[in-house]
Image (tube, rainbow, N blue to C red):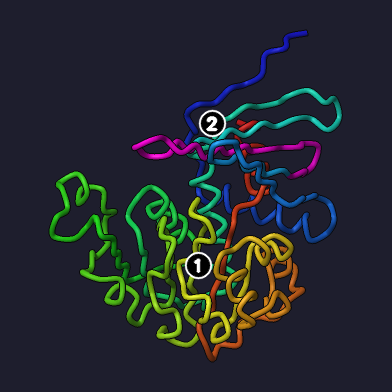
């Protein structure tokens, strides 16, 4: 019997609808106890850096993504990611995948799955903060769940010093603004897609019912909004046990007595099964994701099926 397994170093294109449906099924199975999501683990490396392991079980597959963060003397840190899928029936490896592109897709799709559950059906104005691959992926998925008539984007790389390559990467139908404040003014949905370790917008100044999503970065205790703002918004996360102990703004706010894990209104498994309250509608909504193994496994299974 052959011992060869598929090794993917380039991610094939996957339709947004298929990715969103795969994640919707995975989080629903997690709510029903048909999937397992252990906490992520961080191994600190002697001399600096770390390796984060994201594990999960869905169906007859166990998956683990390992993501090293390797600081380099006088240069940019090396960040890689690899996902391994194993059969829980035979114990044999099924797939090894360079998870760089996979992480971009599952991060964006998870944010937008939350948008689909939390945003008003008639949401028409979208703001994207960031312009890199993660931001463009967020925009692609967002357009799959709402018919946005106005899309604005802000990134420092798209200011007056932008190169022709920077401006050429701006998706069609997107208006570039001169500031984050201009981009988010009056927006129904705001997608924060930065590597910032400090707040990039004032979430409390958004219109009632506006949905803001935020992602993780490698910076310690990174947060794209002010931790003090959590008390003034409806807060949701990707997975309750993980996000409340990992997300920078949540841990900081909890330490300062400004917010607690009990204030989290719901997570994706609960939203998808109706086990948590909907947004109040009278203040902004904040959704925070930290990245989960179940997301990696769901998309790796899609890749395996191809």
Quadrant of the drawing holding the C terminus: top right
On the image, the x and y values in percent for residue 221 come to 54, 61
Quarter of the figure with residue 94: top right
Earlier along the polypeptide chain: callout 2 or callout 1? 2
Quadrant of the drawing holding the N terminus: top right
Local packing at callout 1 (Cα closer than 10 Å; few below 14, some 14-19, many 20+) is many
- Which contiguous range is marked in magenta? 56-79
Q: Could you tell me which secondary element the residue under label 2 belongs to?
A: strand
115 shown above or below 99: below
Does 72 appear in magenta? yes
Tell me which residue sits at (66%, 31%) in the image. 84
Tell me which residue sits at (64%, 82%) in the image. 257
Is residue 210 toward the left or the right of residue 125 in the image? right
Q: Residue furthest bottom?
A: 282
Residue that mark 2 sits on = 98
Tell me which residue sits at (62%, 21%) in the image. 6
Q: Could you tell me which secondary element the residue under label 1 belongs to?
A: strand
On the image, the x and y values in percent for residue 22 come to 64, 49
Residue that mark 1 sits on = 213
């Amino acid at each position: 019997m052959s011992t060869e397994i598929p090794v993917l170093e380039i991610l094939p294109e996957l339709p947004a609808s298929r990715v969103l449906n795969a994640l919707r099924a995975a989080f629903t199975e997690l709510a029903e106890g048909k999937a397992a999501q252990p906490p992520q683990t961080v191994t600190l490396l002697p001399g600096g850096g770390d390796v984060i392991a994201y594990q999960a079980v869905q169906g007859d597959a166990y998956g683990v993504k390992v993501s090293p963060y390797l600081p380099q003397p006088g240069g940019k840190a090396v960040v890689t990611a690899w996902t391994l899928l194993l059969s829980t029936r035979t114990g044999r490896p099924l797939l090894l995948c360079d998870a760089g592109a996979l992480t971009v897709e599952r991060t964006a799709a998870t944010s937008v799955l939350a948008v689909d559950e939390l945003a008003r059906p008639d949401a028409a104005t979208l703001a994207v903060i960031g312009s890199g691959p993660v931001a463009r992926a967020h925009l692609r998925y967002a357009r799959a769940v709402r018919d946005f008539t106005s899309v604005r984007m802000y990134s420092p790389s798209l200011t007056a010093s932008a190169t022709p390559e920077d401006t050429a990467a701006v998706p069609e139908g997107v208006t570039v603004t001169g500031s984050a404040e201009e981009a988010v003014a009056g927006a129904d949905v705001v997608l924060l897609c930065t590597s910032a370790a400090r707040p990039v917008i004032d979430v409390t100044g958004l219109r009632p019912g506006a949905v803001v999503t935020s992602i993780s970065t490698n910076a310690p205790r990174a947060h794209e909004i002010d931790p003090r703002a959590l008390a003034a918004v409806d807060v949701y996360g990707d997975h309750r046990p993980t996000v409340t102990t990992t997300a920078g703004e949540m841990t900081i706010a909890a330490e300062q007595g400004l917010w607690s894990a009990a204030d989290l209104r719901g997570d994706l498994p609960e939203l998808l099964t109706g086990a948590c309250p909907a947004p109040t509608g009278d203040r902004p909504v904040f959704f925070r994701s930290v990245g989960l193994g179940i997301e990696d496994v769901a998309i790796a299974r899609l890749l395996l099926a191809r």
